[in-house]
Image (cartoon, grey):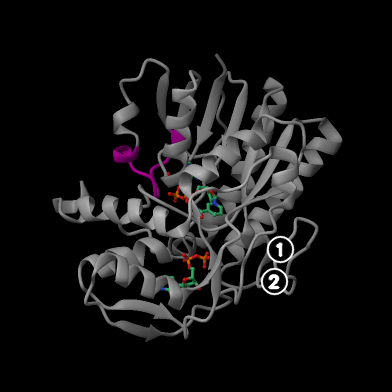
Amino acid sequence: MKSILVTGGAGFLGSHLCEYLLNKGEHVICLDNFFTGSRNNIVHLIDHKNFELVRHDITMPYYVECDQIYNLACPASPIHYQYNAIKTIKTCVLGMHNMLGLAKRLNARLLQASTSEVYGDPLEHPQKESYWGRVNPIGVRSCYDEGKRAAETMMMDYHRQNKVDIRIIRIFNTYGPRMALQDGRVVSNFIIQALGNKDITMYGDGSQTRSFCYVSDLIEGMVRAMNQDYIGPINLGNPGEFTILELAKKIIEMTGSSSEIVYRELPKDDPVKRRPDISLAQEKLSWAPSVPLSDGLKTTIEYYRKMCSIPNGY
Ligand code: NAD
Ligand code: UDP
């Protein structure tokens, strides 16, 4: 049995990862400051004999014994990471530094949940790991984009200089049950709006594209990336590319909603297109996503239908 620290373990992806690792028979230390995560995401794991829950903020040093660290702690929704931009960049950079220090002291393997945002508003399409990206260093998204880029830099420097055992994955838009009701990212927003027959808030004209990966596919790729030899970075995402308008129409149809689409201003620096090239993940991890958008949306809609029918969501 390995002892595994999951930072951000009470968040959307973190809670699915904790569950996956417990099911594999590992011991899981779930660390979270509950900024965007919730105890409700992991309440079903609390009594598991191999599960520990720690309230802590990774911008402060943390000491524990473990074999592996998954560093997921960081708000991921643009609304949440821009809410306190200084805190976001501190979480990305100071948090990464603290986790690298911990990994170095323990000789533990550390996987960083990086992001497709390191490619910014890309000129290369689809995006390969070799692409250096096109990121505004001083814009409203920079606390996250540049924070994650600096975290990758620190990971590589600790690896080159101190031989810290690192893995980096670049996650592309992932969705599924347990995204917070107020998360603000597009899939949960549209589903919740559609289920309530409320206006669907389309930012811009909806021609911008994203590629949506279902959470179970992503978690499988993440664990494979941790337990193999390639250092990274490795793109993880679903190459199926959709315009945001297509997504809205699909969700309206699948929910049988009477919602209307209303157009709002496109947020600053919102990338025009995004699609992962996953040939590296296919080669190194023998991984490719298997859940089509329609199937993933069906499960996610069911989840929110249940959540929205309960006062306060739970
Ligand atoms: P989330 O907001 O649901 O989860 C983030 C978790 O980190 C939350 O539980 C939050 O409370 C916790 N957290 C935030 N700051 C912290 C701090 N300083 N100390 C301790 N805990 C802290 O988001 P998510 O979608 O689950 O994302 C998880 C990770 O994956 C993030 O690092 C994110 O950047 C990365 N990622 C996610 C996606 C995606 O599409 N879901 C895409 C790219 C990258
Ligand atoms: N978006 C939208 N309406 C919403 C939320 C998001 O049109 O209510 C758009 C957003 O402008 C972006 C895309 O959907 O072009 C994906 O946004 P999200 O916040 O999910 O993630 P991003 O990929 O931008 O980080």
The CA distance from mark 1 to mark 2 is 7 Å
Ranked by sequence position, the earlier of labels 1 and 2 is 2
Query: Which of 89/46 is in front?
Result: 46
> Which quarter of the picture shows residue 241?
bottom right
Residue receiving disc 1: 127
**Ligand 2 under 8 Å from disc 2 Cβ:** no
The residue lying at 42 percent from left, 38 percent from top is 15
77 lies above or below 233: below
Name which residue type carries label 1.
Answer: Gln
Q: Is residue 86 above or below residue 64?
A: below
190 left or right of 213? left
Q: Residues within 10 Å of mark 1 (few under 14, many from 20)?
A: many
Q: Residue at x 24, y 69 (%)?
A: 256
Q: Position of residue 259 (x, y in %)?
A: 25, 77
Mark 2 highlights which residue?
122
Residue positioned most to the right: 161
Above or below 246: residue 156: above
**Secondary structure under badge 2?**
loop
Magenta residue check for 40: yes
Q: Could you tell me if the residues under marks 1 and 2 are in contact, i.e. CB atoms within 8 Å?
A: yes
**What residue is at 42 percent from the left and 44 percent from the top?**
11
Residue 5 falls in which quadrant of the image? top right
Q: Name the one closer to the observer, 276 or 156.
A: 276
Report the span colored magenta: 31-41
